[in-house]
Image (tube, helix red, strand yellow):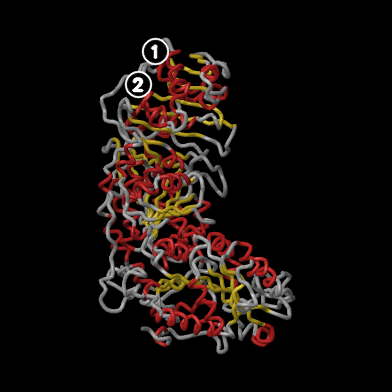
Amino acid sequence: MTTVKELGTYAQNTWCPGCGNFGILNSIKKVLSDLQDQGLDLNKLVLASGIGCHAKIVDYVKVNSFYSIHGRVPPPITGIKLANPDLVVIGHAGDGDAYGEGIEHLIFSAKRNINVTFIVHNNRVYGLTTGQFTPTSPAGFIGRSTPRGSPEEPLNPIELMLSAGAGFVARGFAGKPKHLQLLIKAGIEHQGFAFIDVLQPCFTFYNTYDFYNQKVYELTDGEYDSSDREAAFARAGEWAYGEGERIPIGIFYKVRRPTYDEKLLKGRIPVKLKPGNIRSILEKHI
Amino acid sequence: MKEISILIGGKAGDGIRQAGHTLARLLNRIGYRIFFYDDYPSLIRGGHNFSIIRASKKKIQAHKEKVDLIVALNQDAVDKHRHRLNSGGIILYDSEKVEAQGVGVDFVGIVKELEGVPIMRNTAAIGALAGILDIEWSVLEGVIKDTIEKEVDLNIKIAQSAYNSIEKVWLSVPKLNQKMLPLISGNEAIALGAVQAGLNMYIAYPMTPASAILHYLAEHEDDLGVVTIHPESEIGVALMALGAAYAGAKAMVGTSGGGFALMTEALSLSGQGEFPIVFVMVQRPGPSTGVPTYTMQSDLSFAINSGHGEFLKVVLAPGNVEEAFYLTGLAMNLAWKFQIPCFVLSDKHLSESIFSFDADPDKVKPEDPLLWDGQGEYKRYLDTQNGISPLAFPGNSEAIVKVTSYEHDEYGITTEESEQIVRMQQKRLRKKKTIEDELSKHEQVKVYGNLESKTVLLCWGSTKGACIEVAEELGLKVVQPLVLEPLPINSLKKVLSDADKIIDVEVNATGQLAKLLSAHGICIDDMILRFDGRPFTVDFLLEKVKEVLS
């Protein structure tokens, strides 16, 4: 069995001290180690990432990985899952990736219900390009491309994913790793597209630790019914990624639906398919 | 009779292409070799569509401007094409809808009398045509049974009524004693070549004139053992294919120039990450939307220079269905052997025209890529003597497979160290020698016509068909490179070394092949360029070549 420590690599970690990405990295490693204890073959696991600070995560975990390009995490993980549905696939993306450059792919992943887990490291600022506003930065955000404040309202990705038809919609906080681990584990175990928006402070360009620590609260079983889509929209609307008093974290919505891979492949495994006989097809062309 | 050309014209929605298909099959079944050109505007109803079906005793791969017969389902078919008739040519027309001199048959009346629907006028037209050409009724009946999916009996009745209405043989087309060949389009040949080389997944977003590859593979998924996917955009298409390739599936994507423009970031990722992938690019007139349903060869420079950064690729340019079949198979095998992007560069004229297909399917086989032997620790980007690193796939071995868009070390972990950057770029580029050695085992440059001639028609892709016939007529030589990147410059220089006059023939406005060869020191004397969206026909090109030579 691989321990959490053994899941690390020799790559030098270049995140800033205090970066929210550490909370996500440690959580994913812990979840993978736990799942392995429960029988998951880590050879069947693939991690993917886009471009940005979040994306370095694949260099730091000793598992199969696909380090993609900006915005383009959903298409390759869809291709991986469809080529070999026996694989367990987890995509990581930044908020610029998922909600900016590649938003079309995110919406289609939810619409199709491809059976992968998708974790957004949402620090609401471009870190690696040194501090510009993102699709989830609050209105008026002062960054290097908007020195007089962002003229745009933020996007609410929870509402977006509910509207797009995602069957698993959750929000976590990098500052609450135990809770985040539960969400990631539930996401991986969910059959279908599992979307997790993780609030992740950027220590250097947008330090939101205090803000989130004061405002987040957990949606708990018993008090909250995650199968109720109306209730999910109501909770999603509680905070619009700007100011606000209460920020719910937890599983907003969860429902099992047939997945894209199930419907499209109907039991076929493309990597094991044998080509058919073209001679009989050609005869029909005479 | 050595050959016959027939034009069928009507408005979109009249079933012109379907009628053309039936006619092509009819002539195929009496032993003729076929070339079928389809001309249609970018709309669903109205406008003017026409098909030209040329049938010959010998193999042909081009059509002519002039025709022996016009089948007119509307007035435009007569008014727009009357000038094409050879002397002694005949017009067969719907006497209810069209005014013309020739053989008038009341297609509308026949369809009404037998209670058919208006589109069945095309069946009546084919029935009458078979009568005019003196083709046995049983042959036509067999073709209708095999090709028409709905209302077969009704269509047979309509065809027979029209067939019987012809009282005189106008133009007898004798049966030939030749074996029948499958009739397939360039797009179908591309699809089948890929399948023969082991295609697992075809991923594409609809774009004319490449869409038929997707349609054909989707329709025959189960028979061909292929999974087809139609994603959200060409960006999604190309990235999905890279994910599939990473997982070990042989994937191909197809599009035209505009769609490929969106795929270029994925192309560069395939260069950096060493992903095997085949891009099929079916050209049409640009720039931008251009003229969507017509033909052009204007993306040669784009294809060979596409992608940011420096990396290897192979670009193959088939000119007929046999080449489309073999070269797509070759592209698939090269992509996996060398872990590089490979291109099949087609155009509307090749992809949507239908040819008699005379290839040996067994000549294309899936070739095994270099696989990891399972010894020691796996390094996805192991630095080897020829630059090729053994492949492993997630899930089916102990290997940890890390692929990346970043410059990386042998394990696939990001690096910014100067020695590593140089080492890995050299590793990737080192494959060039092995790729060229492999390509040299295949025919890279074709030569036709009078091999002794010092006057050469230089062409690539679908232009070859017209060039070969013109060269045969005038005693000239034809040179056609099949590989455009890496350019087989030594082979080209060899076949062009004793040429006094090289005439470059291309369907574009700037002579892209001529430019490419000039950059390698081959001097082009003249250019014949056509860029109105129409392909070169044999007779049109013959006149142009004569002008250049006079």
Q: Chain of mark 1?
A: B
The kind of secondary structure element at disc 1 is loop
Distance from Cα at disc 2 to Cα at disc 1: 17 Å
**Residue A59 point in image, percent of width and height:** 44, 79
Mark 2, secondary structure of its residue = helix
Quarter of the image where the C terminus of chain B is located: top left
> Of label 2 and label 1, which has the lower sequence position?
2
Image: B181 above or below A266: above
Q: Dividing the picture into quarters, in which one does residue B386 lie?
A: bottom left
Q: Position of residue B32 (x, y in %)?
A: 32, 27
Q: Residue at x 57, y 17 (%)?
A: B96
Q: Look at discs 2 and 1 and give the one toward the viewer.
A: 2
Left or right of residue A123, residue B168 in this image: left
Amino acid type, label 2: Ser
Residue ID at (38%, 23%): B140
Q: Is residue B368 left or right of residue B140?
A: left
Along the viewing direction, whichever of A165 and B495 lies nearer the viewer: A165
The 10 Å Cα crowd at callout 2, few under 14, some 14 to 19, many 20 or more, is few
Q: Chain of mark 2?
A: B
The residue that disc 2 covers is: B138
Picture quarter containing residue B65? top left
Residue B189 horizontal side relative to residue A16, left or right: left
